[in-house]
Structure formats: structure tokens, C-alpha cells
Image (cartoon, rainbow, N blue to C red):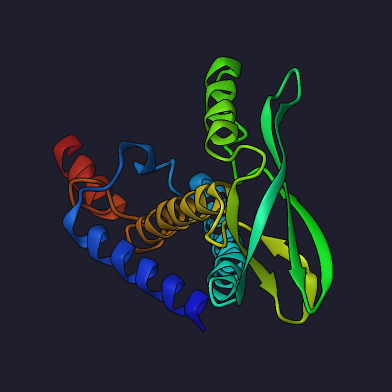
Amino acid sequence: MNAVVSLIVVAAGSAALFWLLPPSPLLRPGRRFPALVPAALAAVVGAVLIVLELGHLQEFIERRNWPSVDGVVVKSEVVGDRAPHPLIMFEYTLDGVKHVGNTNLHAPGFGLRTSREEVAYAIVNALPVGAEVKVFYNPSDSAEALLKPGPTWDVLVRLSLGLMLYFIGIYALLTVLLLAGRDTDGTTPASTESKTETATA
């Protein structure tokens, strides 16, 4: 339901901007119908990304309601030569059973190697071995646990990309379909031809 509402809102916003902004030069007469396919493709791809990533976002939001228990860091180091990232291993006990989990705390997987290495070491230094942490665990599967229940950066990036593609696609489709057969100055091809014939006569 949230995904459908978001798609409707973005489409409504695209329609509103269609009436406020002038047609794009890329959608001048003779270019509009060839632009229909990429516009429709952008809208469809954007809609799919929005639906998928809103589902993932909902999962992360639900994880914030997971119960928590005290845990302790048992391993904290930076791993990976080409793509350095933190590796944090932690222990927690539930009903007398000890569990071990690991995480990279959603460290970004993009950027220069030096910047990624700096982020990784900052996380490792903030969570040394022996540090006490709050562990969020799945009440349906106590072996599934994490330290940071919020959404990851990659979900937000794909959601933003989906919104952008859907917005651009809907706006372009409106321009193609509603301005088809009209010149950018508001005249139609028929009226232009009649003016040309009158001038020739």
C-alpha cells in the first residue's frame, strides 16, 4: 500500500510540474514519439525499484522493534585489501544459549579506497574487543541478530534512483502524449502548413 501511495504521489507531482515547466528541448516535434520508449522504460524501472526498496525499507523499520539484549564485541578488525571494511563479531546470550553474530555496520561500499579504509578503522576503533553493545535479535530466530537495525545506505540509494527515474519517466510521458502533434510554440502542424500555403499563394 505504501508503495502504491508513493507512486501516485510522484505521478501527481510530475503532472503538476508538467503544467508549470516548459517542454524539454529533447521533446520537440519529431523527437517526441521516439522518446516514448525510453520514457516508458524509465517509469517502469523506477516503479519497480520503488516497490522493491520500499519493501526492504519496511523490513528495516520492523527490525527496529526487535527486542534487544546486552552483548560484547569479541573480534574487531579491518579486512579486505581492495575493498577494506570493518568486521565486528559479537556474542550474546539468550535463554542460556550463547550466540555469535557479525556485521560491518553498513559501512559504505563505494568511494576511494583510502576513504573507505578511514571509515572502516573509525568503526573498529569505536568498537574494540570487549566493548559492550546492544544486540537486536529476531524474536522468531534468535540466531539472527544485528547491532544497527536502521536502513542501509544501498537501500536508500536505490530508492532515490527509483524515485528519480519514475519522476523523469512520468514527466516525459505526459509531455509526449499530451503535446503530441503540437509545436513548442502552441501551433499544430496543420495550422503551420496552411500558413505556408497562404504565404506561397
Q: Quadrant of the C terminus?
A: top left
Going by the image, does 97 lie left or right of 178?
Answer: right
Q: Pinpoint residue 77: horizontal percent, then vertical percent.
A: 70, 30
Asked if 165 appears above or below 108 in the picture, the reply is: below
Q: Pinpoint residue 172: horizontal percent, then vertical percent.
A: 40, 53
> In the image, what residue occupies the spot 68% across and 70% down?
137
Q: How many marks?
A: 0
Going by the image, does 160 lie left or right of 105?
Answer: left
When asked about the image quadrant of residue 196, the answer is top left
Asked if 17 appears above or below 64 in the picture, the reply is: above
Asked if 136 appears above or below 107 in the picture, the reply is: below
Along the line of sight, the residue nearer the viewer: 48 or 135: 135
Along the line of sight, the residue nearer the viewer: 106 or 179: 106
Residue 65: tell me if it is visible: yes
> In the image, what residue occupies the spot 56% across and 72% down?
58
When asked about the image quadrant of residue 65, the answer is bottom right
Along the line of sight, the residue nearer the viewer: 132 or 4: 132
Q: Pinpoint residue 191: horizontal percent, then vertical percent.
A: 22, 53
Along the line of sight, the residue nearer the viewer: 10 or 2: 2
> In the image, what residue occupies the spot 48% across and 79% down?
2
Q: Pinpoint residue 194: horizontal percent, then vertical percent.
A: 22, 49
Residue 36: tell me if it is visible: no
Going by the image, does 157 lie left or right of 82?
Answer: left
> In the image, what residue occupies the spot 57% across and 54% down?
155
Q: Residue reaching furthest right?
A: 97
